[in-house]
Image: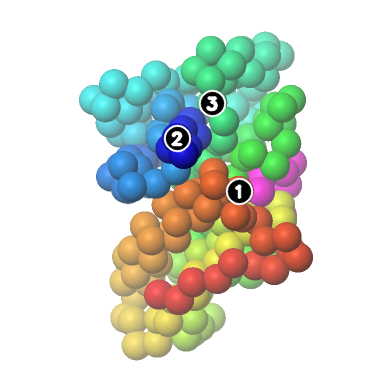
Amino acid sequence: MAPIEPKRVALALSGGGRTLKNLVSQESRRSYRIAGVISSREDCTGVDIAHELGLPVFVGTFGKNAGPDLRSELAQWLRDEEIDWIALGGFLKPFPSIPGFENRVINIHPALLPQYGGKGMYGMHVHRAVHGNRDVVTGATIHFVNEHYDEGSIIAQIRVPIEGLADPEAIAAKVFSSECRLYPEVLDRLCRGSLPLADGTIFTMEA
């Protein structure tokens, strides 16, 4: 039997590119390949990393200032690069719906949704809220993207115990370490067709 051709994934980012580096580092043993990068900013480290890796890059003005042609230009770029899936990793703008990509755009959020989700809840804002509420468990969630921040159907979660961690920075480091396990595994399973689970159950991992 011939090996299954890996699915081509575009990673959408707005910042440093840590998730990009993590996904690329694990792709050789997975059913995906990072085949391009979408960015809401030209001047970010993630774009620099993409260029270093020789990946094609689409940069657009997303969000409320998006131009009328953005959606069609992005759709054409996705076709040109033969992209199968879009994965958001630190993408801070609303992502437009693209015809043909229904249930093929996912995001990772650094908390156990529906807790600590919604507009303005990203990155350290989440971890400071978790620390301020003295939670003993947090985690990360992978979900489908829709028109509302962090409200798409949940695909997978990882639970991260944080009791005794001194500050939001320590929480952030432990959660990101767990994201580095969760995202490649879930993206691999999505590309192989074994996620989402047929009965709607959330796939879970333990840190």
- Circle 2 sits in a helix, a strand or a loop, which is it? loop
Which image quadrant for residue 178? Answer: bottom left
Is residue 150 within the magenta segment? yes
| Residue 158: x %, y % from top left | 50, 70
Q: Is residue 100 above or below residue 164?
A: above
- Report the residue marked by disc 1: 193
Is residue 145 within the magenta segment? yes
- Circle 3 sits in a helix, a strand or a loop, which is it? loop
- Report the residue marked by disc 3: 83
Which portion, as a residue range, is magenta?
144-151
Q: Is residue 122 visible?
A: no
| Residue 97: x %, y % from top left | 71, 31
CA gap, disc 1 and disc 2: 17 Å
Q: Nearer the viewer, residue 35 or 145?
A: 35
- Which secondary structure is most common in the magenta stretch? loop
Q: Is residue 73 visible?
A: yes
Q: In the image, what residue occupies the spot 24% across and 25% down?
A: 52
- In the image, what residue type sits under mark 1? Gly
CA gap, disc 3 and disc 1: 16 Å
Q: Is residue 167 above or below residue 105?
A: below
- The disc at residue 2 is 2
